[in-house]
Image: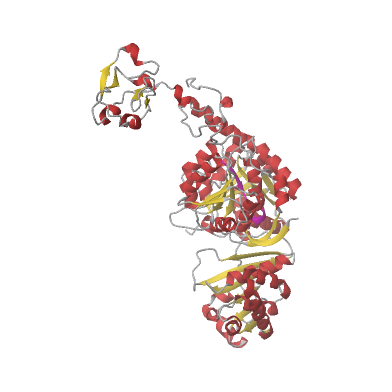
Amino acid sequence: MIEVRFHGRGGQGAVTSCELMAQAAIAEGRYAQAFPSFGPERRGAPLQAFLRISDHPIRLREKIYEPDIVVVLDPALLASGGVKEGLKPGGTLVANTSKSVAEVRGECGFDGRTAVVDATRIAVEELGVPITNTTMLGALLKAVGLVKLESLKGPLETRFGPLGEKNWKALLRAENETVIEE
Amino acid sequence: MADEGMQSWKTLALGCAMTEPGSSKRFNTGDWRSGRRPVTDREKCIKCGKCYILCPDMCYSPDPEAEGYYLWDSFYCKGCGICIHECPKDAISWQDEKEEDTHGAACGS
Amino acid sequence: MARRVGLEVSLACSEAVKLCNVDVVAAYPITPQTHIVEHLSELVADGHLDAEFVPVESEHSAMSACIGASAAGARTFTSTASQGLALMHEMLFIASGLRLPIVMAVANRSLSAPISIWNDHSDIMAERDVGWIQVFAENGQEVLDLTIHAYKVAEDPRVLLPVAVNLDGFILTHVIEPIEIPDQAEVDAYLPPYTPQMRLDIANPVSMGMVGVPEVYTEARKACLVALEGSYEVIKEHWEGFAQHFGRRYQPIETYQAEGAETLFVTMGSLGETCMTAVDQMREQGQSVGQVRIRLWRPFPVDDFVEAVKGAKRLVVIDRALQPGSASGPVATELKALLYDRGIEMYVANFVAGLSGRDVTRADFAAMAQRVEAAQAAGQPMTCEMWGVKE
């Protein structure tokens, strides 16, 4: 079982990211759970969303305390301290940032496997808005192949309708531009 | 405890519903009256129908033989006097009843 | 053919209600239930469900409207939580007293004050004695399954009682997970259209909700009590039928690794799954632990419970609600009473855990077992402890 924690702000689509990943895994016949940090939803407030993917039924209703992967949708959250909390030493950090891996490591204090991509720039160029949730899924899949890339296509279309194609393009571009350092 | 139950729980209708329509018609509220009854003076009556509308026990009904006037029903009248109070022409007034008249079938006024 | 989809559990509940082809939904939004009726209102508005959606001004009105609709012979649904359920309180007795087969999903949530939108069982425990059938789900699939089963039971002429399907707020309602949705024909084969035994009908007038004078009230309540107790066999029968139709089997009391276990956890609701995984891990370390899950809370399946726990050395009962002023939580109180009645001596430890959504983890279960074993060895009772409370 793989556990992922997403860091974002209300309105940036972290919850949607988790949902899309869960949908993709379930479409592959596997098991998944996606859930938000439970509580009121406030636009702009820092929030977390959670994802579990497994090849077996998931019998667990705890929060995720020691994620295998942390995904950060908002560059400003990297320095906030909470990002590396509980992240397994052998885990992976996937960050939206225009900075280098070395700079990100300095900022958030995690020195393990790190993947970076300037998802905000890609999202603005491809979608016209700085909403990075789908873009960052490209980076996540490049860093850790949790689901097959094509498994996300259906969920994207269902979720975004005619905008699915644009999101798909942004996702592919992010996958291509993601830089990973072990 | 006293044996106060009326019938077995097994014979009650579903949800304790009342399955016989209009069974309250059998309920003789007329025997609540004590010694006096309202009587309408048709000389004074202007056929406004307020007694008919305002009676809480629906004791007044249209008189089939005299259009515009109303009949009074001894079986249901509790003797509350609302009709007397509300009549705009003071056409309704109390009349002493003999005990044998108090409880009985419907009768005209 | 059933289809397997990723779906928010709230929406799985709505989809179940749609598959049951309800006639009337009357509801008022309240967190964490809102998604359930929100989705139902969409299904009605988009023409996917031919039902009357009544957007009422309060939960009291929601239950009142459901009572009216059900009395008129409609298949009826509502959903609520917390203060909303509390506001329904007086109407809940009327629904069961009038023997109306309303189905309600309760997205279990704490009661104010202080204001809390998070999960525990305070809301339903305050409605324990309203004469409704009450079941608890542990995951999204069970929410869908139990909702369909709820109509089958509620509308059975041998039962005719309302059913509350309990699902933990947020912990279940807001999670997206795999759900197998049966197709309409499969549900239709299991659940026929509702045929009321009695309804408000101008052609055949009846009066419902009459005065029950002292000469009648006791007998009227007895009739409801007998119906609730008698529902036990019907519930089991229709779970058996459900297994035959859909392949998933439910029991009033379910167990996991309970056979021969010295320590048995007793859980209700979504705690059950985390507990099962905790049991797996503790067994790997050689501990003799198992689990008993209460699926059917009302009517309480006394014999099944006794059978499930016999031979255990201790029970660790986890309540997700307080019973202020009483010695134990509501579930532990129930269990101790029935064990006493049967003359069964057993060490029963009780924790109140997970109030207002506070997480109960695998590590918590392990720590509870450890504490209980130590207390029993020291000859100390563990009547009731608020788990994890900061002193």
Compared across the picture, whether A123 is left or right of A42 comes to: right
Q: How many marks?
A: 0
In front of the other: A72 or A177: A177
Residue C310 visible in this rendered orientation of the protein? no
The x, y position of residue C17, in whole percent, is 62, 51
Compared with residue C24, is residue C115 higher up or lower down, i.e. above or below? below
Compared across the picture, whether A162 is left or right of C96 comes to: right
In front of the other: A59 or A26: A26
Compared with residue A150, is residue C379 higher up or lower down, i.e. above or below? above
Compared with residue B54, is residue C23 higher up or lower down, i.e. above or below? below
Query: Does residue C133 belong to the magenta stretch?
Result: yes
Query: Does residue A169 belong to the magenta stretch?
Result: no
Coloring scheme used: secondary structure
Compared across the picture, whether C205 is left or right of C254 comes to: left
Quadrant for the C terminus of chain A in the image = bottom right
Quadrant for the N terminus of chain A in the image = bottom right
In front of the other: C295 or A171: A171
The x, y position of residue C230, in whole percent, is 63, 34
Q: Quadrant of residue A19?
A: bottom right
The residue range painted magenta reads: C131-141
Residue A155 visible in this rendered orientation of the protein? yes
The x, y position of residue B85, in whole percent, is 26, 29
Q: Quadrant of residue C8?
A: bottom right
The x, y position of residue C44, in whole percent, is 58, 55
Compared across the picture, whether C122 is left or right of C297 comes to: left
